[in-house]
Amino acid sequence: MQTMSPRGLDPALDFRLSRYLPMFDPDHFGDVAFFEELEAIGYRQVLVGGTGAGGTPRLVAQIREATRMKVVLVPGGPAAVAQADLVVLPDVMNTNSHYARPFGSGAVATANAAADLGVPFVPVAYFVMGDSTAAWYYDAFRLPSDKVLLGYARYARMLGYRYLALDYEDPARDVSPRLIAALRSLPDLHLVVSDEFTPARAREALAAGADTVITPSNVYEEAADPLELAARMHQALLADADVDVVPRARVA
């Protein structure tokens, strides 16, 4: 029987996520020059991920070589795991999928790929909140009430999850400040909220108690000028917020 190495088995709970992270799908943002421009705007962290694997490992390596930004990776599966600064392992709490649910085949394979690579990671209790691409991809079901979701969240925290994500991305469903405030009652929990945020709505979510807000890749894909949008989001949300987020040394 193969002996298990302890390398890569403990989550990187000391990693500090930025208060705002723009997400970019490598299938749409595959040119490293774009990420060099993000660094020039002032970004110190960037989120990379999508539903496919594609050129994700190559792009992650190029960003880390060309910039000092820390790359946070949400892999679409084991083939997309790469030597990022942090790999997010989302366990979808409200899914019918045998692939994406906790201990599902995809979740297990992706986690083992991260462990084999020895890359820093964090497991995330992930809730799909709206009718979005994520809902389709993960075959997610709608939780009947915030009370039920809070029960799921408490259970996840009791099992050891320190990161919890609410993925809205549905124009028909607004982010709930009351739900965010209720989740703040759970101790030692980093709360992430993803939605097609404007700067004003992102500030509202942060004011309600979210620790990190995310805009999905399609917000930038549909923008007339993605870099201009990135600059406006940075000015509104990160101008003085990331002074203690230390840039990474360049990869030799």
Image: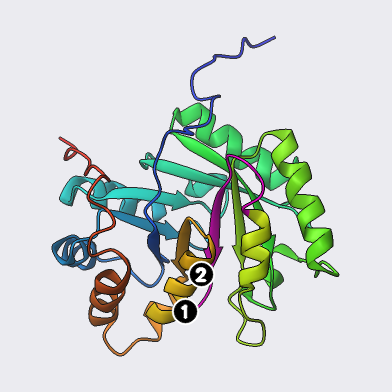
User: Relative to residue 197, is residue 45 depicted above or below?
Assistant: above
Near-viewer residue (44 or 57): 44
Name the secondary structure under disc 2: helix
Across and down, in percent, residue 5 comes to: 55, 14
User: Residue at label 1?
Assistant: 201
Work out which quarter of the rendered image holds the N terminus and state it.
top right
Residue 222 located left or right of residue 160: left
Mark 1–mark 2 contact, CB under 8 Å? yes
Asked whether 166 or 112 is in front, the reply is 166
Type of amino acid under label 2: Ala
Residue 196 screen position, x and y as percent = 50, 78
Write the residue at 48% across / 49% down: 80
User: Can see residue 98?
Assistant: no
Name the spot of residue 51 as percent of width and height, x first: 55, 63
Image point (66%, 82%), residue name: 173
Q: Which residue is under mark 2?
A: 205
Q: Nearer the viewer, residue 148 or 103?
A: 148
Q: Secondary structure at mark 1?
A: helix
> Is most of the magenta stretch helix, strand or loop?
loop
Q: Is residue 187 magenta?
A: yes
Q: Which residues are magenta?
A: 184-198
Count of number-bearing discs: 2
